[in-house]
Amino acid sequence: MRRSNAKGLSADTPVSRRLTFLSDAAPGAAEPALQHVRQSVAACRRLDLKSG
């Protein structure tokens, strides 16, 4: 099921929308991108725990 449209993305498009667009355009490429986002979020959380 496609969740993006033919208009593509603008500069202020949220990351979640960009990932949806990527998933629709190239499903095989979406998983590495999602994994990268998960790792980045986990790293930010670790930094927050250390500073807080």
Image (spheres, helix red, strand yellow):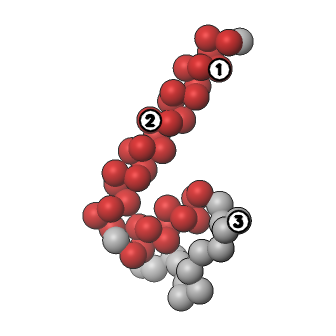
Residue 41 x, y percent position in the rendering: 54, 35
Q: Residue 5 occupies which quadrant of the picture?
A: bottom right
Determine the residue positioned at 44% across, 35% down. Answer: 39
- Which one is in front in this view, the residue at disc 3 or the one at disc 2? 3
Q: Residues within 10 Å of mark 2 (few under 14, many from 20)?
A: few
Q: In the rendered structure, find residue 28 and report the number of the disc placed on it.
A: none
* Contact? badges 1 and 3 (CB < 8 Å): no
Q: Residues within 10 Å of mark 1 (few under 14, many from 20)?
A: few
Residue 11 vs residue 16: left or right?
right
Question: The residue under label 2 is which amino acid type?
Answer: Gln
Question: The residue under label 3 is which amino acid type?
Answer: Asp
Badge 3 is on which residue? 12
Determine the residue positioned at 44% across, 68% down. Answer: 22
| SS class, disc 2 | helix
The quadrant of the image that shows the C terminus is: top right
Tell me which numbered mark, 1 or 2, is placed earlier along the sequence: 2
Q: In the current view of this chain or complex, which residue is farthest to the front?
A: 11
- Which one is in front in this view, the residue at disc 1 or the one at disc 3? 3
Tell me which numbered mark, 1 or 3, is placed earlier along the sequence: 3
Give the CA separation, mark 1 to mark 3. Answer: 26 Å
Residue 10 x, y percent position in the rendering: 65, 73
| SS class, disc 3 | loop
The quadrant of the image that shows the N terminus is: bottom left
Residue 6 x, y percent position in the rendering: 53, 88
Q: In the rendered structure, find residue 48 and report the number of the disc placed on it.
A: 1
Badge 2 is on which residue? 39
